[in-house]
Amino acid sequence: MTRVIRTLIADDETLMRAGIRLILDNADDIEVVAEVADGPSAVQACREHEIDVALLDVHMPGGDGLAAIPGIARESPKTNIAMLTAFGDDHNVAQALRAGAVGFLLKDTGPTELIRAVRVAATGESILAPQITRRLIERHLLSDSKDAEPAKRRIEQLTDTERDVLRLVTAGLSNAEIAQQLHMSTGTVKAHISRILAKVGCANRVQAAILAHDAGLPAGP
């Protein structure tokens, strides 16, 4: 039996919530179990409904999605969070990912890509497009030099193979793409990523990619 991904939509615009629900309802393996209009309600819904994936609008008058991330992480640690916004503001992206979100989606994401993104988010994988990752590196993260030395010390714990995997994670590749590049099985890649996260103390692969940027570890093969 296919596992159903229990999903929350948090957006203050009723029509936007309805549109997202309409798209997700077309996927047999996704169930929208709650809709809310602000951050505090999102935290409560994740706690009450055992949400797998929370889609949070960044800006909501009753409490924004960025502020809700720590509460969801505390009250429902198994929930993976993806942010939704009308524009990809670099500061908001970095803030959300550092707080523990697994990805960042634009509201003009197409139906097929939105469904795929929810499925990817449910696994805890990053759903940032490679071009967004590169933009973060160029405009925000590498300028944050105060984090460089602590980040380097954390990265030094990794083996050469784990560094190779992390470089490809940082480049925005999926587990399957990393497996192809490094001639491994996807199961082996997942195992490496789990060990990487444990060693460097990151909650997810996006945080690990940011740490790699801070440490100056180059992305790619």
Image (spheres, rainbow, N blue to C red):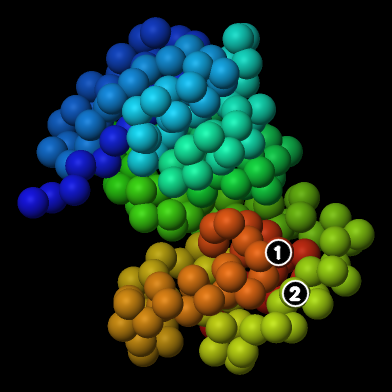
Residue 139, placed above or below residue 50: below
Q: Is mark 2 on a helix, strand or loop?
A: helix
Dot 2 or dot 1: first in sequence order is 2
Q: Distance between the residues labelled 2 and 1?
A: 9 Å
According to the picture, the residue beneath numbered tag 2 turns out to be 154
User: In the visual, does 51 lie left or right of 215?
Assistant: left
**Rendered position, 49 above or below 190:** above
Q: Which amino acid does label 2 sit on?
A: Arg
Give left or right: position of 154 versus 76.
right
Other residues around mark 2 within 10 Å, as few (<14) / some (14–19) / many (≥20): some
Residue 95, given in percent of the width and then of the height, sits at: 70, 40
168 or 54, nearer to the observer: 54
Contact between marks 2 and 1 (CB within 8 A): the answer is yes
> Residue farthest to the right?
146
For the point 16% across and 31% down, which residue is it?
26
Residue 208, picture quadrant: bottom right
State the residue at coordinates (48%, 79%). 192
Q: Nearer the viewer, residue 88 or 21?
A: 21
> Badge 1: how crowded within 10 Å, few (<14), some, or many (20+)?
many
Counting from the top left corner in percent of width and height, residue 151 is at 79, 69
Q: Residue at 61% x, 91% y: name it.
A: 160
Q: Can residue 113 be seen in this view?
A: no
| Label 1 sits on residue | 211
The answer to whether one can see residue 200 in this image is yes
Q: Relative to 90, does residue 45 appear above or below in the rendering?
A: above
Q: Where is residue 209 in the image (x, y as percent from the top left)?
A: 62, 63
Kind of element beneath mark 1: helix
User: Residue at image x 40%, y 48%?
Assistant: 121
